[in-house]
C-alpha cells in the first residue's frame, strides 16, 4: 500500500526498503503510533499511519495522521470514511487533543474528503528539512 501512496505524492519517492523500515519502527514500538488497516477477507485494501506526539499549545497528546490510502479499486465505497472515523473515535477514547494531517495541496478531491469528515484548514504552513539516512 505504501508504494502506491508514494507513487501518487509529489514530495516523496517510492523506496520499498525505506518505507518498510518506517512501518517497522511504528509496529515495533506502539508508543510511537499505530498502523490501522482496512481489509477484505483476502487482502489489505487500505491503511493509515497514526503517530503520537505532544502539543504544548494543546497541553496534551495529539495525533499526526499520515499515509492515508485506499486501493483505487475500493475507493468511493466508504472504506476511507470508515477508516478515518475509526481513527477519530480512537483519538477520542484515548483523550488525544487534536488530529493534524497533511494532504496534497494539488488534490482538491483529497481536501474535500477530509473537510467532509470535519477537518479544517489551518493557518500553519508545513515546512520541512530532510536528511539522508
Image (cartoon, rainbow, N blue to C red):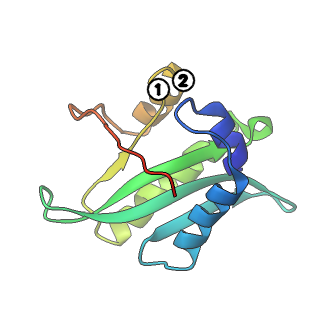
**Callout 2 secondary element:** helix
User: Would residue 44 appear left or right of 59 to someone viewing this image?
Assistant: right
- Is 28 drawn above or below residue 13 in the view shown? below
Disc 2: which residue? 109
Q: Position of residue 41 (x, y in %)?
A: 85, 62
User: Would residue 56 appear left or right of 96 to someone viewing this image?
Assistant: left
- Is 91 drawn above or below residue 116 in the view shown? below
Quadrant hosting residue 94: bottom left
Q: Residue at x 48, y 29 (%)?
A: 104
Q: Residue at x 46, y 35 (%)?
A: 103
Residue 80 visible in this rendered orientation of the protein: yes
**Callout 1 secondary element:** helix
> Which mark identifies residue 112?
1
User: Would residue 130 appear left or right of 60 to someone viewing this image?
Assistant: right
Quadrant hosting residue 95: bottom left
Q: Residue at x 52, y 29 (%)?
A: 110
The crowd level at tag 2 (other Cα within 10 Å; few <14, some 14-19, many 20+) is: few
Q: As rendered, which of 129 and 125 lies closer to the eye?
A: 129
**Extreme right residue here?**
42
- Is 13 drawn above or below residue 59 in the view shown? above
Residue 78 visible in this rendered orientation of the protein: no
Mark 1 vs 2: CB contact within 8 A:
yes
The crowd level at tag 1 (other Cα within 10 Å; few <14, some 14-19, many 20+) is: few
Q: Position of residue 81 (x, y in %)?
A: 56, 44
Figure label count = 2
Q: Position of residue 96 (x, y in %)?
A: 29, 65
Amino acid at each position: 500500500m505504501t508504494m502506491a501512496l508514494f507513487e501518487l505524492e509529489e514530495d516523496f519517492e517510492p523506496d520499498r526498503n525505506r518505507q518498510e523500515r518506517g512501518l517497522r519502527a511504528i509496529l515495533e514500538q506502539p508508543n510511537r503510533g499505530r498502523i490501522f488497516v482496512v481489509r477484505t477477507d483476502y487482502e489489505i485494501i487500505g491503511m493509515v499511519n497514526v503517530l503520537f506526539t505532544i502539543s504544548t499549545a494543546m497541553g496534551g497528546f495529539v495525533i499526526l495522521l499520515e499515509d492515508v490510502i485506499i486501493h483505487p479499486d475500493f475507493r468511493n465505497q466508504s472504506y476511507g470514511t470508515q477508516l478515518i472515523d475509526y481513527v477519530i473515535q480512537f483519538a477520542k477514547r484515548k483523550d488525544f487533543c487534536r488530529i493534524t494531517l497533511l494532504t496534497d495541496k494539488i488534490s482538491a478531491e483529497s481536501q474535500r474528503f477530509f473537510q467532509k469528515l470535519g477537518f479544517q484548514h489551518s493557518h500553519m504552513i508545513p515546512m520541512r528539512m530532510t536528511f539522508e539516512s
